[in-house]
Amino acid sequence: MTLICLLIKGTNLQDRKRIYNYRLSRARRVVENAFGILAARFRIFGRPIDCQPEKAVKIVKACVALHNFLASTERARYMPATFVDTTADTGEVQPGEWRQHVAGDRNMVDGPRCSVGRARPSQRAALVREQLADYFLSDAGVFPNQYNVLRLGTDQ
């Protein structure tokens, strides 16, 4: 199931559901940026990795280790502030430069979307969604900016 399938659909959503959608979308952007930066900096991710799965795992781990090293020692050159997606004060997402680097890559395409209105989530998926929504509003899981999103009137 893709992340987009877990979003709660609707236009007049309760604050609880809007916060849930915001947090899920935010997590998706973080993951998308991480993979996008790897693909932009390590060109092996721009096409299918044609090797045995065990070797592919080693390649990915090596790239992640190099990425972490470069991000911690050469951040200004390796990953300038404009390279990653940012969020403006209005809540609008500003695409990062990594997207230009991977524009023609065969591996950086959107996954399939869920059919709207045709299938309901399983009971287990609905339960997980409710548990996450509860956590996002709890003292342990709250993210202060989530309330700013409600005031701005956007889920991004």
Image (cartoon, grey):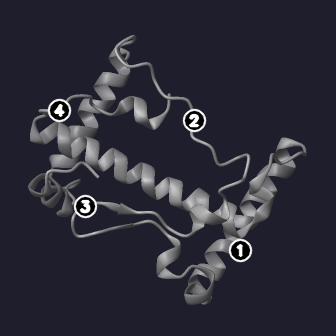
In this picture, residue 96 sits left or right of residue 121: right
Q: Kindly tell me whether residue 37 is visible in this rendering.
A: no
Q: For the residue marked with disc 1, what is the amino acid?
A: Leu
Q: For the residue marked with disc 3, what is the amino acid?
A: Gly
Q: Tell me the residue that label 4 is attached to.
A: 11
N-term mark: 2 or 1: 1
Numbered disc in front, either 2 or 1: 2
N-term mark: 2 or 3: 3
Mark 1 is surrounded, within 10 Å at the Cα level, by few (under 14), some (14 to 19) or many (20 or more) other residues, namely: some
> Residue at the spot x=47%, y=80% of the render?
81
Q: Tell me the residue that label 1 is attached to.
A: 66
The Cα–Cα distance between marks 1 and 4, rounded to whole angstroms, is: 43 Å
N-term mark: 4 or 2: 4
**Residue 147 screen position, x and y as percent:** 13, 57
Numbered disc in front, either 4 or 2: 4
Q: Quadrant of residue 16?
A: top left
N-term mark: 3 or 4: 4
In this picture, residue 122 sits left or right of residue 139: right
63 lies above or below 4 = below
User: Under tag 4, what secondary structure?
Assistant: loop
The Cα–Cα distance between marks 2 and 1, rounded to whole angstroms, is: 27 Å
Mark 2 is surrounded, within 10 Å at the Cα level, by few (under 14), some (14 to 19) or many (20 or more) other residues, namely: few
In this picture, residue 83 sits left or right of residue 59: left
Numbered disc in front, either 1 or 4: 4
**Residue 94 screen position, x and y as percent:** 39, 65
Q: For the residue marked with disc 4, what is the amino acid?
A: Thr
User: Which label was assigned to residue 111?
Assistant: 2
Asked if disc 2 and disc 3 are in contact, CB closer than 8 Å, the reply is no
Q: Tell me the residue that label 3 is attached to.
A: 91
